Amino acid sequence: MKRRSFLQSAAALAATPALQSLLDSAAAQTPPAITPAPHRFPQDFVWGTATASYQVEGAFHEDGRGPSIWDTFSHTPGKTYQSQTADVADDFYHLYKHDIALMQRLGVKGFRFSIAWPRVFPQGTGTPNPKGLDFYKRLTDALLAAGIEPFCTLFHWDLPQALQDQGGWTNRATSHAFADYARYTVGQLSDRITQWMTTNEFDSFIDGGYGSADNAPGLKLPRRELAATRHNAVVAHGLAVQAIRAAATRPILVGLAEDVSGIMPAIADPAHIRAAEIAIREVNAPYTTVVLEGRYTDRYLATLGADAPHFTPDELKTISAPIDFFGLNCYTTQEVVPADTPDGYLIVPRPSTYPHMASDWLFLNPQALYWTPKFLSSIWGVKKIYITENGCSCDDVLRPDIRVLDTDRVLYLRNYLLQLQRGIAEGNPVAGYFLWSLLDNYEWGSGYSKRFGITYVDFQTETRTPKLSSDFYRNVIANNSVV
Ligand code: BG6
């Protein structure tokens, strides 16, 4: 068939409701002559999906929840896409049982979500709000009843506004308040939840919130204050690790979720790999490197000079408190080449034709899921990794006659998972994968303009419609392999 006439007939087919039943019955038909070899995952691999409180819950005034910095930020005109807020978002606060049914349809074994700190402590500290905590009890009870293990993040950016009024993460008191909140919450919920993460993506809530002003609270601090604020955040993580271990009422596992800035060798030869090893430690110096090594790199401190953070040996010990797993949020990576520079590498600027998904930052490079876990294991000796986020934004269109056939997202997921499997087969210690995201949701500054879900959400009606990618993921999970 000529290219043009093929496209025409495909378009005609897509326009008919018959396509849906054709898709549904395809699986039931006789086995095809061609059966691609499956790339298998380990037997006990945890397949999951991920969300975060502010992005899905809505119910922003309900049951005593206090305001967070994201309420303030999103309600300030011009801060987010079309000044959109997450006052309602996916209304997950009320529809969570429905969404657990979606998870059961997928067959996931784990669900990563976050607790909204201002639901538990409306003022950030002081008197807890039992009604806020009750929501997470109901949620985790329902997950466990559905055979889905809860993986809980304690902080995914929705800092209580009351703490921001006292400086937020610029104030060391916030690090201690975070540990207190972690202690209380884990004491209350560790009968139900054994997998805990402290913070999600330091760089996003510190550099994005206090450096570039893209995220709440929308500040642009001078370099010295920004460096001190970063330091407060990693101290908070370390204090929380200690608090979680002390408060747990039964054995639990603690980690964090980090968007390690991905670096890979442009060419997989020894010189490029060495350059990548040097680069990944340096570009992640303020966060991953200090958390895993208990030291800031010489280059980081020298670059900051007089603006470098002040720290004590005790603080470095706290920051690098041993963790049980590393949660890796992994969307993309960037190539390095060896170069005649003081550090011996060059991060290659992306050519203008480098492909990306709907978000302009989300460059397509499946090898992120091969190299980043490999470096976590080879450089820092990490023994257990969960991919706590991976997925992509696409220009999804829900047409009245058919659902979303997001072949672009399937392309992304298939190729990333193939690289993940390739790495695991070589020994990368990855124990699970949480797809971002179960639902289209409130994508921070992008509001509802970027869709990351494998389920389409109509934000007027809250109707959920699984996309083609959700069938793809269901197949991967059912077969524990990707083809
Ligand atoms: C991660 C965050 O950075 O990426 C998620 O942990 C976020 O909360 C996701 O939704 C997509 O990023 P963004 O900035 O495009 O919304």
Image (cartoon, rainbow, N blue to C red):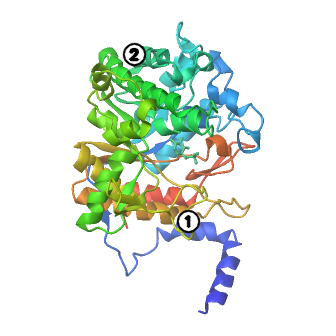
The residue at the point 66 percent across, 76 percent down is 13
- Where does ligand 1 appear, by image quarter? top right
CA neighbours of label 2 inside 10 A, class few (<14), some (14 to 19), many (20+): many
Q: Secondary structure at mark 1?
A: helix
Does the beta carbon at disc 1 come under 8 Å from ligand 1?
A: no
262 in relation to 218, above or below: below
Question: Which of 37 and 327 lies nearest the eye of the viewer?
Answer: 327
The residue at the point 63 percent across, 37 percent down is 213
- Amino acid carrying label 1: it is Asp
Residue receiving disc 1: 408
- Residue 201 visible? The answer is no
The part of the image, by quadrant, that contains residue 148 is: top left
Whole-Å distance between the Cαs marked 2 and 1? 42 Å
Mark identifier at residue 60: none
79 in relation to 61, above or below: below
- Amino acid carrying label 2: it is Arg
Q: Please give left or right for residue 111 compared with residue 254 in the image.
A: right
Residue 95, percent from left and from top: 61, 34
Residue receiving disc 2: 183
372 in relation to 133, above or below: below
- Where's the N terminus, which quadrant? bottom right
Residue 275, percent from left and from top: 30, 58
- Where's the C terminus, which quadrant? bottom left
Q: Please give left or right for residue 349 compared with residue 271 in the image.
A: right
| Residue closest to the far bottom | 2
- Residue 345 visible? The answer is yes
The residue at the point 46 percent across, 27 percent down is 228
